[in-house]
Image (cartoon, grey):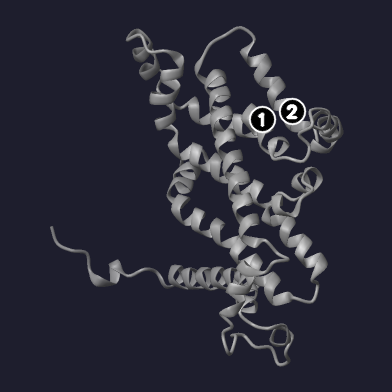
Amino acid sequence: MTAPPLAARRKPPRKTVARIVYHAVMLTVSAIFLLPFYWMVVSAFKNNAEIFARPMRWFPDPIRWENVADLFTRPDFPFLQQFLNSCFYAGMVAIGTCLSCSLAAYSFGCLRWRGRNLVFGLTICALLIPPIVTFLPVFLGWSKLGLKDSYWPLIAPYFLGDAFYIFMLRQFFLGVPRELMDAARLDGASEFRIWWQIVLPQVKSALVIVGLFAFVYTWHEFFTPLIYLQNREDFPLSVGLFTFRSQRAAEWSMAMMGATFTALPLLVLFLFTQRFFRQGLATKGF
């Protein structure tokens, strides 16, 4: 079999031009979106005068590495403690969401019981209720229990499920071969063991997506911890940075350094989970 002539293997000029234009547009759009992030990072290594210098300086000269040490040692800004609070808060919410929602999704997607479709429909209807409608009775309930100034109101609700994530996981669970579950039942496996050892490994990418969404949403959550928490040492970074900016409005470089370290865990998390994220998008289109 002879190779096709070189002219036939060349791409048509129109396709080549379209590809060049496509990449140029994508690079331009990416640069526009990355510009605020770049400005935040470089401003973190300047002093306040250099941030507002004219003409604008695109790179810090000199690089003020001492800003990093100042961020972690300031007595009026417990950044490290608030960073650990955010990790604990977002991590527990991600774990609770994955456990509770996967159990509910397994029940809706893999088990047959009377009234299943009705209960699932009511669960989906919960998405239509704005959270602000239920906020006041929930807040009063936690106050009556004496747990208002603690992390319980922030974490415990996510161990009871979330309608959006239940719906997402159920769509993945419907794709798990039922023959695997039926074979396990014939061998005497319990439903809990089937959920844990057979179904969950089949939807690993979906669980990672749900955990990632829950973690990122909680990491940025501002209103709920602002209402429930009173002590500065208990604040997550979202509230801690806001409080610092309110009290030290002129210290832009320190605020930018705090914002940079706040965004860093999310970038690292996305780099480690992007493989599962792409698999989930390719499988169900989320």
Q: In which quarter of the image is the C terminus?
A: top right
Please state the horizontal and vertical placement of residue 84, each as a whole percent of the image.
59, 53
Give the mark nearer the N terminus: 1 vs 2: 2
| Residue at 73%, 75% in the rendered image | 252
Badge 1 density bin: few <14, some 14–19, many ≥20, Cα 10 Å: some
Furthest residue in direction front, as rendered? 75
Three-letter amino acid code at the position of disc 1: Ala
Q: In this view, does 223 lie to the left or right of 4?
A: right
Three-letter amino acid code at the position of disc 2: Ala
Q: Is residue 155 above or below residue 170?
A: below
Q: Is residue 131 left or right of residue 73?
A: right
Q: What element carries label 2?
A: helix
Q: How far apart are marks 1 and 2 (CA)?
A: 7 Å
Label at residue 126? 2
Q: Are marks 1 and 2 in contact (CB under 8 Å)?
A: yes
Q: Nearer the viewer, residue 57 or 5?
A: 57
Q: Nearer the viewer, residue 250 or 280?
A: 250
Furthest residue in direction left, as rendered? 1
Please state the horizontal and vertical placement of residue 155, each as a whole percent of the image.
66, 37
Label at residue 163? 1
Q: Is mark 1 on a helix, strand or loop?
A: helix
Please state the horizontal and vertical placement of residue 178, each as a whole percent of the image.
41, 18
Please state the horizontal and vertical placement of residue 136, each as a whole percent of the image.
86, 34
Q: Nearer the viewer, residue 33 or 104?
A: 104
Q: How many labels does the image show?
A: 2
